[in-house]
Amino acid sequence: MNGTSGEYSISEKVRERLDRARPFLGAVFLAAYAGSSFVPDTPATTVLLVSGIVLYAMSVPWASAFHRGLAVVAFAVLGLTIATGEFDAGAFFGGLPAYFDVAAVLLILSAAGYPIRAARYEAQVQGLVSAARRKGIGTNTTAGGIGHILGAALDVGSFVLVDVVARRAAPESRVDALTWAGRAFSFAPLWTNLNLLTATTITLTGTSYTGFLSLTLPFVVLGMATTLFFAQREKEEPKVPDEPSATLDRGAAAVLLYPALLVVAVAVVNTLLPAVPLTAAIAITVAAMVVVIAVIATVLTKRTSPVRRLGREARDSLASSHPEVALFGSAGVLVLSLTQIGALAPVGEVLSSLPTFLVPMALALTMAVGFVVGIHVIPMAFLIDTAFPLDGGSSPALWAAAIMLGAQSALLLTPFSSAVTMLSRLSGLHPLEIGPKRNWRFGLAVALGAVIYLTALTLLLI
């Protein structure tokens, strides 16, 4: 065996052994997150920090090139901070848990789709598509609806169900169906509290969920209606005949109601426990509902398979958590280091010097440009908040809407978004092909709509 092959073999063996330890360490990490959410500044916070750092060290070497590159940049800036004598260890390690919190919530959210990832629900979604087709609704339009509604709970995992159904219902236009699912999904973060960027933005701005909805829902309704209108008008390839088994029943209704139920449940918990951050309320609610559903399914079926499947999915999620931990660990190192050397001060000065009525547009533009050049939207929100505290000013809810609209405008125009990554994986197309090349007109239309809408909101609120 040559040296290269030997090194590869050793690397794979090391990764295999570390990955076997990840589920246990991840469970400790999540338990510490739960404890620190209710009682901050306790030993649980220390456990979260230590377990997060260990997971981060185990994640970066086997994450993607993008994540490894981000880690290199983050530690280069950290090195600069130390070299200039600006490094404050207490502030640095005291700030890292906030970023590990985000990674923990993402891992918990990965379980949100458990109830409707069961194999039998694929047939239920197929039944919905068949029923819509009998009513004259095209596959692209239905794919958009599924991408949007199920995206509220499954995030980009909703594209997997769209892909499964499109392979059967319209195999020749499967890529088009995925494209429209992505376009419709881009409106979901503007209303669902299960989206982590939405929850983070609401938390940073200090606005209420209802206040956020009041500003964003009109844009969602109009945008979705327009998107589905053009999806219906687009010519589709001939479709295969309906499958005899693709019929509607109560399971199909459950597929559509489940995301709405989760969103409402999170809103109720957030209202009853206002002292708990929205991100923690999401994690608590999702975890509790998924476990309850698994237990009820076990009791009703008198089989242990539902609980075993949940355990298997949870273990697999923790074992493959390299991207989430690597992203937010590096984001924490980068943002905290930039803060300590004062590199973000000019950004804050520019935003603070602008007339108030221009701030929403500047926030949206900053989010969109940062996303396109490769900065993930959640770290970008943290960067902006560090430079320009978002809970100040005359209308924090308007700041929240601006951040979300800026991110949405670029969601399908950057190869660095999870939506484009998932669409690329399912379609087999390059991220630039399934992303910007297919969606640049859509992205420009959304951006133009966002400018008009933000202008109207600014005139009304400021």
Image: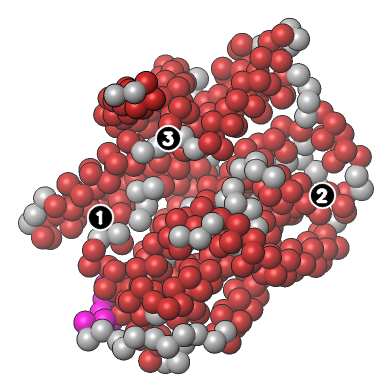
- Tell me the residue that label 3 is attached to: 322
Going from N to C along the chain, the mark reached first, 2 or 1, is: 1
Q: Give the quarter of the image for residue 38.
A: top left
Q: How far across and down, in percent of the image, does residue 340 sit?
A: 72, 19
364, 415: nearer the viewer: 415
Give above or below for 301 relative to 96.
below
Q: Is residue 338 magenta?
A: no
245, 88: nearer the viewer: 245
Residue appearing at x 41%, y 69% in the figure: 162
Q: Nearer the viewer, mark 3 or mark 2?
A: 3
Q: Amino acid at mark 3?
A: His
Q: Amino acid at mark 1?
A: Ile
Q: Give the quarter of the image for residue 23.
A: top left
Whether residue 39 is visible here, answered yes or no, is: no
User: The magenta stretch spans which residues?
Assistant: 245-253
- Alpha-carbon distance for marks 3 and 1? 28 Å
Q: Amino acid at mark 2?
A: Ala
Q: Residues within 10 Å of mark 2 (few under 14, many from 20)?
A: some
- Tell me the residue that label 2 is attached to: 362
Whether residue 322 is visible here, answered yes or no, is: yes
- Tell me the residue that label 1 is attached to: 293
Residue appearing at x 68%, y 21% in the figure: 77
Q: Is residue 248 magenta?
A: yes
Going from N to C along the chain, the mark reached first, 3 or 2, is: 3
12, 73: nearer the viewer: 12
